[in-house]
Each structure stands twice: as C-alpha cells, then as structure tokens.
Amino acid sequence: MTSLNAADFMKSISADQMLYPELFRAFERVRWDLETDIPWDSFDPGLLSDEQALTIKMNAITEWAALPATEMFLRDNRNDSDFCAFMSVWFYEEQKHSLVLMEYLRRFRPDLLPSEQELHAVRFEFDPAPALETLMLHFCGEIRLNHWYRRAAEWHTEPVIKHIYETIARDEARHGGAYLRYMKKALVTVGDGARSAFAKIGVLMASARRTAQALHPTNLHVNQALFPNDTVQSRLPEPGWLERWLDQQIQFDAEWEKKVVDRILHNLSLLFDRSFESVQELNRFRKEIAASLATSEEVLASRPA
C-alpha cells in the first residue's frame, strides 16, 4: 500500500531525523495535475447515474473534513514540528481530493455541487486525544480509504470518475506510507508507549467485522459536547449515506474488509518486526506490551524519590 519498499521502510531512523524534507520531495515527484492528468474530455454522460453522482458529492464533502483534522493534528502535535510540517503536504493533497470531486460535479453535474455551507458543516472542533493513538487511527483510516476508493472505481461506470477514484486511492496509500514512517520514528523516541498506542488502535481498527459501523476517522465520535452530532458523517446532508454506499452501492463486502485487515496486520508486522496473522495475535502482543509497561511503572514507583 505504500510507495516505500520494505528495505527503505526498515532502514534506521534516528530520534533527531526529520522526515518532512524527504517526504516532501517524494510526494512532489508523483504529484498529479488537476487540469492535465485527469481525462476530462473522456466524459460519457450516458454512464453516470443520479445515484452515482450523489455519492460523489458526499465524498467531496467528506474529504473537506481534512480541514478540521489538520487543525486537530497541529494542536495535538504542537511539540513535533517535523510532523506538523508534513501536515502542509497532507492537508494540500486531501483538500485537492475534495476539489477534484467538486470540479467533476461543476463540469458535469453542477446541480449537485456542494455549497460552502455544506462544506463548512463538517468543520468543527475535535476533542484533544493522545497524539500517537490519533496517528495510528489515521494510518488505518488511509488504508481503509484506499480500499474504499479502489472499490468505488470498480463500481462506477463513467471513465473520468473511475480515473479520479483510482488517482486519489493511490494518494491515500502514499499518505499511509508516510504515517508509517512517523510511527517508526515514534518507536525510536517513545518505545513501548508507542507500541502500546499503535497496538491498541490496531486491534480496534482491524476488528470492523465485529462492529455495526464503518471504522474510519470520519465515522467516529470526536466531540463529546456535540454528541451525537459529532462525527463528520453525521454532519453531511444525508448522514446515513456511508452505510448505504458501502453495503448497497460499492458493496464493500467481507472479502474487501479482509484486504483492509490484512494490510493493517502486514504493516504492523513490519513496524514491530513480529508476524501477526490475525487480530487475536495482535491483541496478545498488545497485552504483552501493557504488562511490560505496568511492570516498568511499578519499578519506578518503588524507587525512592
């Protein structure tokens, strides 16, 4: 799922090594152009249904939620200038996803173009949360979104929107690869605290088949004071569209869900240098790390002040 091969990923990362300069250059080399890299002239109006067009609008609004997510990342990672600098790249590309979907609607279905009010509705404050757990949550979210968009590209019949979904799916994979680099760096700087955070969220995000809702950051509650209207999806013009899109339209079934889980487990196997074939194995690792941290805390507590 990443643009980095295993050898590149596993290379040594020192605690003081900034990743932003390298990631910026890597992303610049593969960046696509909104005007020239999208085959706008290939549009076939007979291959776009009203049902399909409406899902494009909902995805455009959902992608706009990168704005409050970036505000959250900058707030909760105030002490990590390297990661906050990378947010400039991530935010640019995520907003570009919203823009290209809206440009498609502007050209071919202007009646469905989101209004500024509809876009602004998904900009609200997220409650503070542990930075490493949030990083892992969004890493898993990029993996899931990559697979959602790949499946959406297969479901759509109109060639231009198929190309767009394939394009932004590749972006989401690269974003996941970049997050993985920052997670690797956190293992160097934080150690078992980072392992505990990543394993905890990994178990949650790889257990979607046991939950009634889609486990993606835009579908999770993030502001207790606004509950239950505190998910990005709940603030869309049609709050229930995501489940319908996944279950009835792009048909993101158990086979596709397994692909998501397998990618999460594969990447955590790389990260922790330990093979995980199932969520249960990852959960056992999580318990081991939790026990190790508890023992360390007991030792520290027993020492004289």
Image (cartoon, helix red, strand yellow):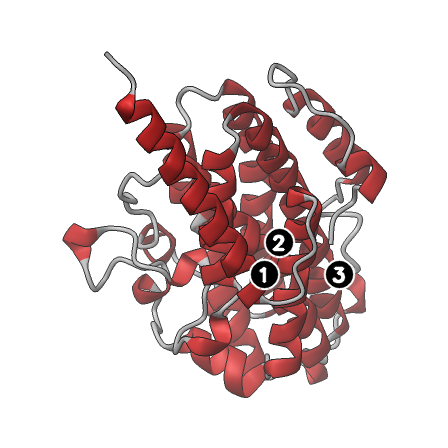
Badge 1 crowding class, 10 Å Cα cut-off, few under 14, some 14 to 19, many 20 or more, is: many
Left or right? Give the position of 155 relative to 186.
right
Q: Give the label, 3 or 1, closer to the camera.
A: 1
Observer able to see residue 50: no
Q: Which residue is mark 3?
A: 40
Closest to the observer, 252 or 39: 252
Left or right? Give the position of 92 relative to 244.
right
Q: How far apart are the alpha carbons under marks 2 and 1?
A: 16 Å
Q: Secondary structure at mark 3?
A: helix
Q: Position of residue 49 (x, y in %)?
A: 60, 84
Badge 2 crowding class, 10 Å Cα cut-off, few under 14, some 14 to 19, many 20 or more, is: some
Q: How far apart are the alpha carbons under marks 3 and 1?
A: 24 Å
Q: Position of residue 181 (x, y in %)?
A: 65, 35
Q: Which residue is mark 1?
A: 145
Q: Residue most toward the bottom?
A: 248
Left or right? Give the position of 71 relative to 153.
left
Observer able to see residue 138: yes
N-terminal of the pair, mark 2 or mark 1, is 2
Tell whether label 1 touches label 3 (CB within 8 Å): no
Hey, what amino acid is under mark 1? Leu
* Number of numbered discs: 3
Q: Position of residue 30 (x, y in %)?
A: 80, 40
Closest to the observer, 248 or 177: 177
Left or right? Give the position of 209 relative to 260.
left
Q: Position of residue 116 (x, y in %)?
A: 37, 52
Q: Secondary structure at mark 1?
A: helix
Q: Which residue is mark 2?
A: 100
As drawn, 251 above or below 5:
below
Hey, what amino acid is under mark 3? Trp
